[in-house]
Amino acid sequence: MLFGLANVELPLAMLLYHFDWEMPNGMKYEELDMTEGFGATVHRKHHLCLIPIVNRPLQSKELLTHPRPQTPPSHRQPPPHAPRLLRPPPPVPFPRRPLMRLQLGELHFLIVSSTEFAKEVMRTHDTNFANRPQMLATEELAYDSTGITTSPHGDYWRHLRKICTVELLSARRVRSFRGIREEESMNMCQWIASRQGSAVDLSERLYMLSFNVIVRAAVKAKAEHCEMMISIFMESIKLFGIHDGGSLSIRQIAAVNHRSPVQDPSDAPQLDEVLDSMIEQQRAAADDGDDAKFEGFLDILLKYEKDGTLTTDNVKAVLLDMFFAGTDTSTTTIEWAMSELIRNPSKLIKAQQEVKKVFDSEGSHIDEEKFHDLKYLKLIIKETLRLHPPAPLLFPKLNSQRCEINGYEIPAGTRVMVNACPEYWNDPEMFIPERFEERSLDFNGSNLEYIPFGAGRRICPGMLFGLANVEHPLAMLLYHFDWEMPNGMKAEELDMTEGFGAGVHRKHPLRLIPIVNRPFA
Ligand code: HEM
């Protein structure tokens, strides 16, 4: 009894002392499912998944990073699938945690937070770690994980990846979408200008912008499809944020999210139906020889369906990749860039002066040809992606075979997350675009200290498209408008709390008051 109570008291006290706890998916506390499971002892039926917020930081001896020195490795029997220490690494000063193992239920995770270990995962053992974990969410929503993002490493993935880099997202193709970017950014700015002087929900408009650009690059979609898909996607993206990995079914996940259209098929058309209808329309348009000059993602993918190397489901899975991987990432980058600029007025002014200098002489036309002159804007985007990488742990990787990293044994099937900000920078929490003047790090993953697009085989193939989708609207927002905080708030009062989900959004939408500075031509 005494031993049992002691074993309860200490961990419980620590959980209560060190953390605040929130429910996932914005659920209320009273909605927590309390069903009991069946077994020798009465467990909870479903795992208890909560969001921890560190309230009192942990001391170094409590970290899981390394084996505790006082316990000789030979006395400890690691569970059969746990990474086993073969050779103790040199001591690392607190608070750096280069390697951290987590066990959630039956699943093993490895969090890599140093360039040294990231190099092992994404260079030395790149092929081995180029797999993706198969999750129920991706199996059910992403056509048995047959998209580029979700498919296992192998010949099928290589085929998709080639289609992606050579055709869908090549530099030539990204340039061909320039008209779409210009039109959609202009629509957004005109909408904002029409609300001059009152607070606008910039986050929502940015999301719509990114989504419209990707949908128009993909298909000749009708407006009502866009709206319907936006709401379905926004719900689905939340589901992808749950790394349940195997214990919950998608219906259970959907049930958690009460507003999810996936929950009740009668509520809204399913994603699959919308995609089917898009494909049908595209086929019909192709038969009519409609808009033959424009070649979007779906035109290209349907060619592969016709030659038999992709099925219709494969086509839908790749389309979903474009929508999921392409919208949230660009939106959050612009959202955080604007937030940081608002909080740092001197940097906002500097950025505005630069865009005005470049485009005033162009008759106010924000022309992408001139973007190489926007040196400071590019630094702002780099710094935003450092401070707020949309995928801070990249996408989860999985090793096909057992391997050894710096003395640790990593069993096959471990889920590996690589921290996109592994090293400590000077003043890491500060927004200092100028830091990249001194250190010219590029986005292609060659330097593992800076990897907002990942690195190695699975590096983001949409980098060029993503950056173009960020640069253009950001330049327009800075050129045409001055910005004020609502309700007389001061810039430093802007809430910068991060939300919970697949990509790291702002927790609360960015609401700002636009004042037109340069009218539209
Ligand atoms: C600012 C914009 C973007 C950022 C920061 C970003 C970031 C990332 C990251 C971190 C990964 C995971 C890499 C890894 O696991 O090592 C990734 C993968 C991917 N991204 Fe992006 N991305 C962006 C835009 C886009 C766009 C616009 C598209 C396409 C329309 C796209 C398509 C993909 C795909 C298909 C993958 C999966 C690649 C694979 O598994 O082989 N991304 N992206």
Image (cartoon, rainbow, N blue to C red):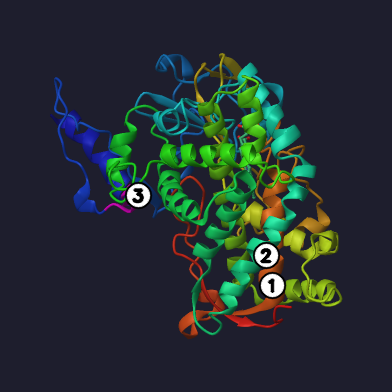
Q: Which residues are magenta?
A: 18-27
Residue 335 seen by the camera: yes
Residue 450 seen by the camera: no
Q: Please report the residue visible at 29 percent of the width from the left and 42 percent of the height from the top.
A: 263
Please identify, in this view, whether the residue under mark 2 or under mark 3 is nearer the observer: 2
Residue 474: mark in rendering: 2
Residue 478: mark in rendering: 1
Nearest to the observer: residue 144 or residue 400: 144
Q: Which residue is mark 3?
A: 25
Mark 1 surroundings: few (<14), some (14-19) or many (≥20) residues within 10 A: many
Q: In the rendering, at what x and y percent does residue 183 appear?
A: 67, 63
Nearest to the observer: residue 234 or residue 133: 234
Q: Earlier in the sequence, mark 1 or mark 3?
A: 3
- Look at the image and tell me in which quarter the N terminus lies: top left
Q: Is mark 2 within 8 Å of ligand 1?
A: no
Element type at mark 2: helix
